[in-house]
Image (spheres, rainbow, N blue to C red):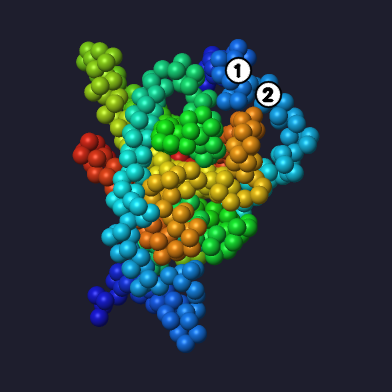
Amino acid sequence: MTGPSQRVLRAGAVLAALALWYVVSAVPLVSADFLPGPGAVLATLVDILEHGYRGTTLAQDTFATLGRCLAGFALAIVTGVPLGLLMGLSRRVEAASNYIVQFMRPLPPLSYLILLILWLGTGNSSKVALLYLTAFPIVTSAAMAGVRGVKRQRIEAALSLGAGRAQILRYVVLPSALPTIFTGLRIALAAAFSTVVAAELMAASNGLGWMVFSASQFLRNDVIVLGILVLGALGMLLNWALVALDLRVVHWRGLD
Amino acid sequence: MRRLRGPWTWTALSLAVLIAGWVALTAAGPNGPIVQDLFLPGPGELWSGFLDLMTDGYKGRSMLDHIGFSLERVLVGFGTGAVVGTLLGLAMGYAPTIDALAGPFVEFLRPLPQLAYLVLLIVWFGIGEESKIILLFLAALPVSAVAARAGVRGVSLQRVQVARTLGASEWQIFRHVVFPSALDEIFIGARLAIGIVYGTLIAAEIIAGSTGLGWMILDAGRFLRSDYVFVGIFLIGLMGIALDRLLVAIEARVVHWAGR
């Protein structure tokens, strides 16, 4: 699937796109106001790394975005996984809380950002709350689905071997549910990452989303393109990090 | 008595506590409600806000207009993006060369926050419908492509070989073996895609819109009409669920052999 010729083709496609970008902006078929060339974007990168963009450095903006995203995500894991496990184990807990989770899940997060800003102000807390609420229903649903997917035979086998409730939870339910939980975590982190940028476009004074939005108001298309490239790389990195973690932690995935 | 202890009792109980809490927090006491209606409107205000919006519309347009604008954008953007993305994904699943050529771009686009490129699209195409439709097209495309590719890759080799031994042509294999087997995954991708497209649209309307449900709640929020904001959020939630159900219904009709 990823033989050497595949890799050459992939690299070639990326290089061809870069070359096309260079030619289009160098000739110039498209005015530099609309599409700055690779050289201009590279110069902007160097400039922002050295002097920052309107008072914040690229590293600060990146960490501001990542920090919000991961804070909301972490809160969602800490609360959503236990609740989801409980919902999977007890029909009563499920009945009492699932309708709320299932109403929140398809709700576009930006729709309630306005309320959160009204309640918590425009600072960091409304953004972290937004990302928490984005990730929470996804993580919770995944944990519940994970528990529900545990095979009855396994639990019965453990029971007949004399395992107690806590042992079954620790050695049967949790390991069987973990692959599904990790899939949920990947979806949740991707959703939180998309949402943090949208929130920063709307109301923020730092972060990569803010940088892109502010650049658009000053018609700094070089900064916009740079921001998009950085965000794309960051998104791929986050996904890759979770896949790597998944492989390490849930090394028994797919062995069922 | 035993029957009364079924799980639905717990749903009813939890809902009752929620509503009681809401009423208690917003009811007018001697010193006014505990929570100002600016922050949390009570049930009565919400209902009258809902009736207001339904009869008078919002800012010169009826609610049906706003819902219609949002719906049209979602369906056009999702429709074009899902069709092109699925075709691309099928080709990627079929031909490793196409996969290698298109893969890097699909993989870059998929985790990229959609709103980041909205800014560039607005600079290029203006603030009108064009930039929003292209945004939604780009949001749906990579999700559909990845799903269709996975669908083709997941087709069991045996089926293809059986068809080949029976003398099927490449087109027949695609039409009667590969495509039907991949449809399952394609629909999973389509449901994911429409959720992402819908979320992206609401965000886009909030950031750069002048019509639609997303714009309505932003505008209502600016004027501190939180009753309208709440009604808007409920409408947005219901519409999201309706869009998802629509795809499930289509899937049930088209992929009637699912799970066999």
Horizontal side of residue A136 vs A244, given as left or right: left
On residue A25, which mark appears?
1
> Circle 1 marks a residue in which chain?
A
- Count neighbours of disc 1 (C-alpha within 10 A) and say few if under 14, some if 14 to 19, many if 20 or more: many
Q: Residues under labels 1 and 2: Cα distance? A: 10 Å
User: What is the tally of numbered marks visible in this picture?
Assistant: 2
Residue at 44% across / 18% down in the picture? B98
- Residue B102 locus on image (x, y percent): 48, 22
The mark nearer the N terminus, 1 or 2, is 1
Residue at 46% across / 77% down in the picture? B25
Q: Give the structural element (helix, strand or loop) at label 2.
A: helix
Do the residues bearing badges 1 and 2 touch, measured as CB atoms within 8 Å? yes
Can residue A113 be seen here? The reply is yes
Residue at 36% across / 40% down in the picture? B74
Which quarter of the picture shows residue A38?
A: top right
Which of these two is toward me, A87 or B74?
Answer: B74
Which of these two is toward me, B201 or A187?
Answer: B201
Callouts 1 and 2 on one subunit: yes
Which quarter of the picture shows residue A44?
A: top right
Name the residue beneath numbered marker 2: A40
Can residue B164 be seen here? The reply is no
Horizontal side of residue B166 vs B60, given as left or right: left
Which of these two is toward me, A221 or B62?
Answer: B62
Vertical position of residue A129 compared to residue B186: above or below: below
